[in-house]
Image (spheres, helix red, strand yellow):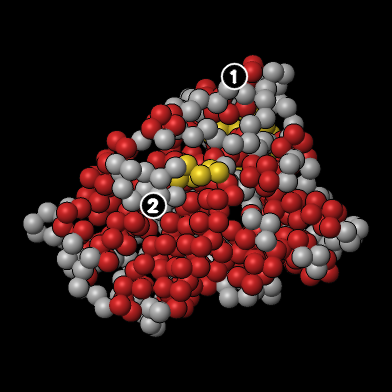
Amino acid sequence: MKNIYKNIIRCSFLALLAISVIGCTFDEVIDPNGPSVDGVEANATIGQLNELVIGVESSFRFGHGTETTASGTMARELYLFNADPRNTGDLLGKNGIGLDNNSFYSTAQWNGSYRCIKNARLLIGAVNNTDAVNETEANGYIGFAKTIIAYELIQMLKSYDRARIDIDDPENLGPILEFGPAMDAIRQMLNEANQNLGNAGSEFVFGLSEGFEGFDTPDTFSSFNRGVAALAAVYDNDGQGALNALNNSFFDLNGDLDVGPKHVFGLGGNDIINQVFRVASTEEVPNNGDQIIVHNSFIEDAEEGDERVAEKTQPRPDPSTQDGLTGTHESTLYESVLSPIDIIRNEELILVYAEASILQNNLEDAETALNIIRNAAGLPDYSGAITSEALTTEMLRQRRYSLWSENHRMFDLRRYGLSNTLPIDREGDQIFNTLPVPLSENAND
């Protein structure tokens, strides 16, 4: 555990400064004496601070591919058919096998998220130990960094049901906290970050990638922060807290569903691509290699006329089979290796509003929100019972189809106690709804 964080401290700064989120988005800033952690921990220049911002945003994407496909497999959204048998074995509990706490599906997201978190903590420390920026400018850096940390920690709770909040001192790490205490700390961090953003003036002194276009000033970035705060609140069963946060976010019942900040990708030597993209099959060239195969239940359970099925998937020329599993459709969720991935978008916030409204027993408001999602997908208005139970079922159904293969369903089912409703695809398979914390973390906790 300590070795992981020491390596992050010593190495990630140098590695991440070489990565621009999109090559043309940022001007390259080079320390002629060789950038290092020591060089920014005290008396950092604005250029060095801005390099750290680039590193934070770049590392924000790390581990996303494994996070999405692992949780999607466990939640029976998809199968990942490739050369690694653990994707169709371990993650589905084949023949009673348990999850391995030292395997890629356990370590990739954990290490990727904590690399980003450590870089964001390094940025905060550097800002607090330099005279290069005034208090207003410092608030902008800190509000940005704390918001990113909080978002990453929420992803950890979704996947692992726990998280380590305090990582400032690699020799004396804080404990791994259970969901409740960890969420309390995350929500407090989001509120602190929002206060920082409110004291950051009208402009940041650093640039963000085009993925944050429209969310690149303290005020507009605060609307992203409040969206994340609303998400955290519903995950914490606090409907009123979520509604309060939504009022100050970019949530818009009548707005474009796709609006929101995004991860962006590039083909540069030190950049990364969208790891959830797969080449679509054709009759002439079927993709029979590394494929994301849609779980048949996603197709079979869809309402007639739901346009999201055709938007996100396509029939394969022939059904694909591997390891005793078969699927008739494959993912077409992204168009290319450079397709952006939503961090959070208005469509999700409308679903958060529906959920928060149900928690507050504002059932007509929930129905209105769910109808907006349904109508956008080509479906008629909801016609079921107007009860908390029935609307919760409908809300989870709309989340399933709107947020397919975006690392939501496993957690949605777990938090509503519905994991046991998932289908068993092969005799002897099991249902898992939480990834194991990596062995190195447990050994040193």
Quadrant where the C terminus is found in the figure: top left
User: Residue at point 32% right, 65% down?
Assistant: 25
The picture places residue 57, in percent across and down from the top left corner, at: 37, 58
The picture places residue 281, in percent across and down from the top left corner, at: 57, 39
Residue reaching furthest to the bottom: 202
The picture places residue 228, in percent across and down from the top left corner, at: 55, 62
Residue under pointer 1:
97
The picture places residue 83, in percent across and down from the top left corner, at: 48, 25
Q: Nearer the viewer, mark 1 or mark 2?
A: 2
Give SS at disc 1. Answer: loop
Name the one closer to the observer, 444 or 15: 444
Q: What kind of residue is marked 1?
A: Ile
Q: What kind of residue is marked 2?
A: Ile
Q: Is residue 139 above or below residue 356?
A: below
Query: Marks 1 and 2, how far apart in space?
Result: 32 Å
Horizontal side of residue 304 vs 50, given as left or right: right
